[in-house]
Amino acid sequence: MEQPWIVDRDCSPEAISAVLAEHGFAIIPNAMERTAHSRLCAELDEHFETSEYCEGLFYGKDTRRFGGVLAKSRAAQDLALHPLAHDVAKEVLGPFCEDIQLNLTQAIELSPGSLSQAPHRDQDIWLGAVSPGEMMLNAMWALDDFTVENGATMVWPGTHRKPEMVIPDTDGVPAVMPAGSLCLFLGSTIHNGGANFSSRVRRGLVISYCLGWLKPAENPWLSYPPEVARDFAPGLARLVGYRQDAPSLNNVDGRCPSELLRHNNDRKVLPFIDRLTPEQEAMIEQFNAMQLQMRNVAA
């Protein structure tokens, strides 16, 4: 069977974005270096062991999940900025926002006997939201081999172009891939976690990106408060919300929240600083010039 959604890890973000636009998902085998994969698994292992099984119909009673992964793993921090995910997210989402942001991190373990998850679109968390393009891109990193037997993520190709479809009328495609691989899928693509018929758990890590002006699924400021984010790389701190977008979106006392990460920050009372788009600056300058001209004429 032809699988045009499988791409090489040397592909450019533009090429991978084209595959996503056509099929709604892409699989990149062996996207992660082996040393990085081993380190990531070792750092997350204890958190999987101490996590509780989920409650409710959606998350799965035989599934363990935990969030706030960037505070638990240095390797996950690096992964959030991995070019095969982060740069592709910028390519897909960038035209529709000033900057992308982290939507969530979620480590997932399917236990033997777990049922298949209900098919869904992740972007449905923003009911009623309207965007001229995609709103979310998910990166599912395989911590274990993903197989049909152990519950590989199932994806329905092309469903990102069928917004009216709620329940798929065809079988999904299992994202079969070796440990260390990456499955990217759009927030508009129908997918689910598969059923685990094997005798072993299946682990994966989702790092999800979304438009910078949306409310992320995982609260970033409680997951990564200043005392945690202060140790992040600048690009990662920006990704989790310590930034200000024009016009003055996401400010703290009229200033960029990244100032809270300075070690000598004592929250002095400081002046508000404009954060405008170039178009807004030009419009306001023209408006002010007209006012001055009228004032001079009146004088």
Image: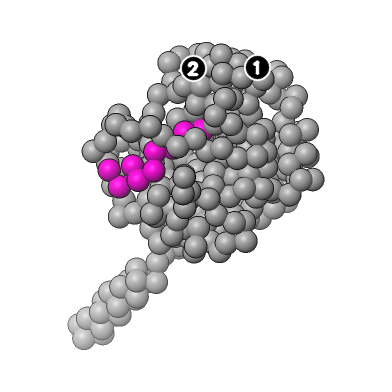
- Verify whether residue 41 appears in magenta: no
Q: Nearer the viewer, residue 12 or 248?
A: 12
Q: Is residue 132 left or right of residue 113?
A: left
State which quadrant residue 44 falls in. top right
The residue type indicated by label 1 comes to: Ser
Q: Is residue 211 left or right of residue 106?
A: left
Snapshot colouring:
one colour
Reading the image, the residue beneath label 1 is 199
Q: Where is residue 73 drawn, in percent x and y?
A: 72, 37
Q: Specify start and end residues of the magenta stretch as a single range.
A: 153-162
Which residue is located at x 23 percent, y 38 percent?
Answer: 164
| Residue 103 in sight | yes
| Disc 1 versus disc 2: nearer the observer | 1
Q: CA distance from mark 1 to mark 2?
A: 14 Å
Q: Nearer the viewer, residue 280 or 32?
A: 32
Q: Nearer the viewer, residue 30 or 204?
A: 30
> Does dot 1 land on a helix, a strand or a loop?
loop
The residue type indicated by label 2 comes to: Leu
